[in-house]
Image (cartoon, rainbow, N blue to C red):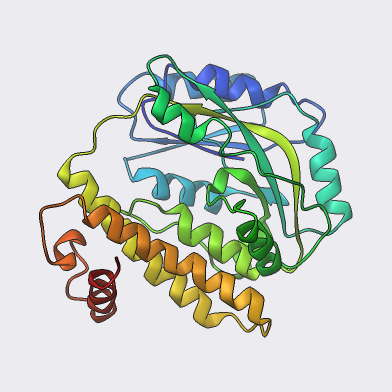
Amino acid sequence: MIVPVHNAEDYLALCLDSVLLHGNIALEIICVNDGSTDSSLSILERYAATFDCVTVIDQPNAGLSGARNSGLAAATGTYVCFLDSDDWWRPVDVAALIRSARDQDLDVLAYDAESFRDPGVATEQWALYATYYRRSREYGAPVTGPRLLTEFRKNNDYRVSACLYFVKLDLIRAMDMSFTLGMMHEDNPFTFEVLLNARRAAHTQVALYGRRVRAGSTMTASSVERSASGYVRSYLLMLDALGRWRGDDPEIAEHLGRVVYQALVNARAQHRKLAKPDPLDSIPGLGLEPRAYVAALLMARLR
């Protein structure tokens, strides 16, 4: 398990205690202190001194992607998963989930999350996430990753959050997968590529993950630009991954393509929030890349 930590002193005890309660399974908990300026590091060091399974990596702030990548580099277990430091694991039988994944020789086992509403979360915001992380049905029979992604999408059950998947570390290492530094929406290309390359994948409706929904803040023009940029970069990275796919199922090809296309639609939606007529203005740092220019031209034609 990889836990990126940045100024999470108010949540760390709940987060780590919720994992340590699962004493019936051998866990490697890699906590990456990503340049915290509060007491997060001292809290992590106390846990590491008490529990042999807790390892702390202390590094200058590199963002969520950089912290996760550091954790991936240090991981040694069979399966890897991610837990945000303000979230937690719920009291379910994790050992049974991992045993099922191993018995079925799964590269990926997807699971669900239960949302928790923090004080101050507006009704409109809560309505978006109250049941969002609970998929509509179980996809228990092992299939290829692209097929599972297709079935997810057909039922509006595809969720990009990297925190909702156990993934074989060997798969990540074999495909040299990592999170892209310095971008928003980094889960989009990572989860897409994981499923694209999984030989065997399945899903359980067990809600292992506890997702904290915190009060949202109004996005500034700068953050909207970063969001648009993140979606465009996701589109380009996913397009690259799709170009390496060698499947021949037309239905799967269609749904994979639609997932990639959705990133461009999301970029366009963010760009519309800005008073800038040229989509290139909403993707800072990418204007000199020819493919980004093509993406901007496509965005301009989306309704």
Residue at 54% in and 81% down: 244
Residue 167 at x, y = what percent?
Answer: 67, 54
- State which quadrant residue 284 falls in: bottom left
Q: Examine the rendered structure and indicate whether residue 279 appears above or below residue 271.
A: below
Quarter placement of the C terminus = bottom left
Q: Examine the rendered structure and indicate whether residue 303 appears above or below residue 247.
A: above
Q: Report whether residue 18 is seen.
A: yes
Which one is in front, 172 or 298? 298
Which one is in front, 141 or 298? 298
Residue 7 at x, y = what percent?
Answer: 36, 26
Which one is in front, 115 or 60? 115
| In the image: residue 163, left or right of residue 42 | right
For the image, the number of numbered tags is 0
Residue at 79% in and 44% down: 98
Quarter placement of the N terminus = top right
Which one is in front, 4 or 192? 192
| In the image: residue 170, left or right of residue 217 | right
| In the image: residue 260, left or right of residue 194 | left
Q: Report whether residue 86 is seen.
A: no
Residue 145 at x, y = what percent?
Answer: 68, 65
Q: Examine the rendered structure and indicate whether residue 193 appears above or below residue 11.
A: below
Q: Residue furthest right?
A: 103
Residue 192 at x, y = what percent?
Answer: 54, 63
